[in-house]
Image (cartoon, rainbow, N blue to C red):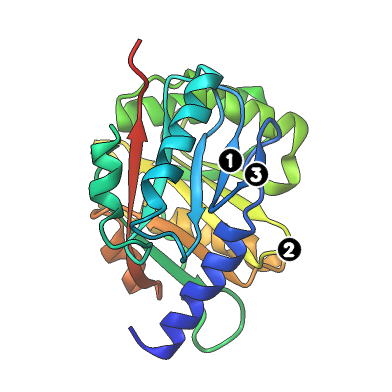
Amino acid sequence: MNQDQHTLLALFDHGMRENARPDGPGARVERAGPVVRQVGTADDWNGVVWSAPELDSGTADAAIAAQVAYYTALGHDEFEWKLYAHDRPADLPRRLRAAGFVPEPPETLMIAPVGPAATAVELPPVELPAGVRLRTVTDAAGAELMAAAHERVFGSDPSRLRRQVLARLERDPDSFVGVLAMAGDEPVSSARMELYPGTGFAGLWGGGTVTPWRGKGIYRALVAFRTRIAAERGCRYLQVDASDRSAPILRRLGFTALGATTPYVYRPAR
């Protein structure tokens, strides 16, 4: 990792993890000893976003146990410890598994500058297949279409996403952008962007396209569409936790890979 990449990673750790902002109107961020965690309702993302670099083999197990006890007492079905490859101690993954956490597939943390600088992310032309258009999500009908697209792409229950989108539109619309790709009246892709005021970062999340429409440039168009909005709103960096499918596309668009991030999920026994 070169010096520029170290600098980007330090900016991300400081702004988006150690000084994290809630990612929804029903959530709050707390500093609890050596960790920073987000706490919300059952519909919100709940979990640890940052752990102090000083966390070591003598303190890690106690910190993990404290979070398990805290979140279990809330009664939620699950919570997450979001682990990054550079987090310490080096054996933290083993310690999380020993405490009952289950790792999900790793993703790649990718960041790109936004704006007029020569190093900024490239904005490709939005070349969509014939009959496909992009639109933002501004109301309950749009939230329903976004949830329908998510269900078709990922095969998961869309009700939680629907409730999250509606809550953002109603209570915190300035920090959320939902986007749909529509083929006529059919939602064929959806994505969202989270804006984090005061950090300079915006996060790209949830991009997915139904199988028959993949490989036609829709994902790239959604990235470009959200990038322009981020630039208009004064963001300096875009951040993505990229899957193996999206990472190569993002590299070609100017994103830099800064390491792996793995969700470790704890589900209390019922």
Q: Quadrant of the N terminus?
A: bottom left
Disc on res. 198: 2
Q: Which residue is mark 1?
A: 38
Residue type of the residue flagged with mark 3 = Glu
Residue type of the residue flagged with mark 2 = Gly
Disc on res. 22: none
Q: Is residue 167 visible?
A: yes
Mark 3 or mark 2: which comes first in sequence? Answer: 3
Separation of disc 1 and disc 2 at Cα? 18 Å
| Contact? badges 3 and 1 (CB < 8 Å) | yes
| Contact? badges 3 and 2 (CB < 8 Å) | no
Residue type of the residue flagged with mark 1 = Gln
Give the x, y percent position of residue 52. 50, 61
Separation of disc 3 and disc 2 at Cα? 18 Å
> Which type of secondary structure does the marked residue at label 1 adopt?
strand
Q: Which residue is mark 3?
A: 30
Query: Which residue is rendered at x = 68% and y = 30% of the image?
Result: 26
Give the x, y percent position of residue 262. 32, 50
